[in-house]
Amino acid sequence: MKIDLHTHTLCSQDCRSEYDRIIDAVPRTGLDGIAVTDHNELRGALELQRRAPFLVIAAEEIKTNDGEIIGLFIREWVPPGLGPLETVNRIHQQGGLAYVPHPFDEVRGSRLKREALDRVRPHIDILEVFNARNALPVFNTRAQVYAQEHELLAGAGSDAHTYAEFGHAYVEVRPFETAEEFLDGMRAGSWHGRLSGPLVHAQTRLDRTAKLLGLAP
């Protein structure tokens, strides 16, 4: 199965992607499913999970007090602002997987800081080694090296905020039904990706501004 592990809906403050249009866009990419990882929100993931004819992993990109951590396969909202370890604990308490996105993209102030990453490393399940929105290829390369050095499972996601981005990065694993089966499949899985380019960031800034001005839902 080809699963894009990092995507967004209009429930993220910097995204305007609507559920029905996502449902139309994803099958055309060859993906078998996506993880919906809205910023500090779970509502969009649960709603798309209810509507979509393909697999949707309910997830949340949580802003800790030291940077972002994604909770995959979660059922309950995890509040932002907690420490990284407390956030990981809350993810695991509900049977979810802790996934660290874009850990070495130095352009993003939202990345999990290196000291915090080193501190929670024994407790995370997957490290994102390819994010299609990373500003420079070297940021992905550094994540790949870190994952290899510390024997971490390697994940990949498009970080899609627009419809055209879905599938720019994904993991390929055997079929699964539970978080445990997915994690087991990741050990023998593979990842694939290509960068989306700088224009997607301009669109994100426009979408965030439109929301702030009340011009978009």
Image (cartoon, grey):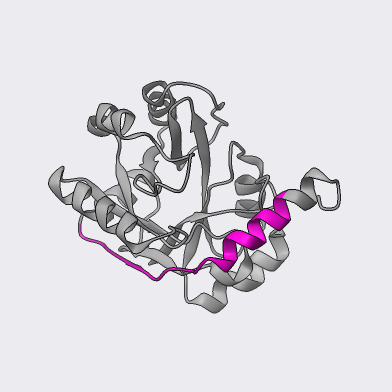
Residue 175: % across, % down = 35, 62
Q: Camera-side residue: 188 or 130?
A: 130
Image quarter (top left, top right, bottom left or bottom right) of the N terminus: bottom left
Instruction: Give the left or right position of residue 6, taking residue 155 as reference.
Output: right
Location of residue 161 (image quadrant): bottom right
In front here: 100 or 5? Answer: 100
Q: Quadrant of residue 135?
A: bottom left
Residue at the spot 86% in from the left edge and 46% down from the top edge: 214
Using the image, determine if residue 131 lies above or below residue 146.
below
Q: Is residue 201 magenta?
A: yes
Residue positioned 31% across, 62% down in the render: 173
Stretch of the chain drawn in magenta: 188-208
Place of residue 139 in the rendered image (x, y in percent of width and height, measured from the top left): 33, 55
User: Residue 182 versus residue 177: which sits nearer the camera?
Assistant: 182
Q: Count the numbered circles shown.
A: 0
Name which residue lies at 55% across and 27% down: 80
Toward the viewer: 81 or 98?
81
Does the segment drawn in magenta span residue 23? no
In the rendered view, tell whether residue 210 sits above or below residue 99.
Answer: below
| Residue 164 drawn at (x, y percent) | 59, 72
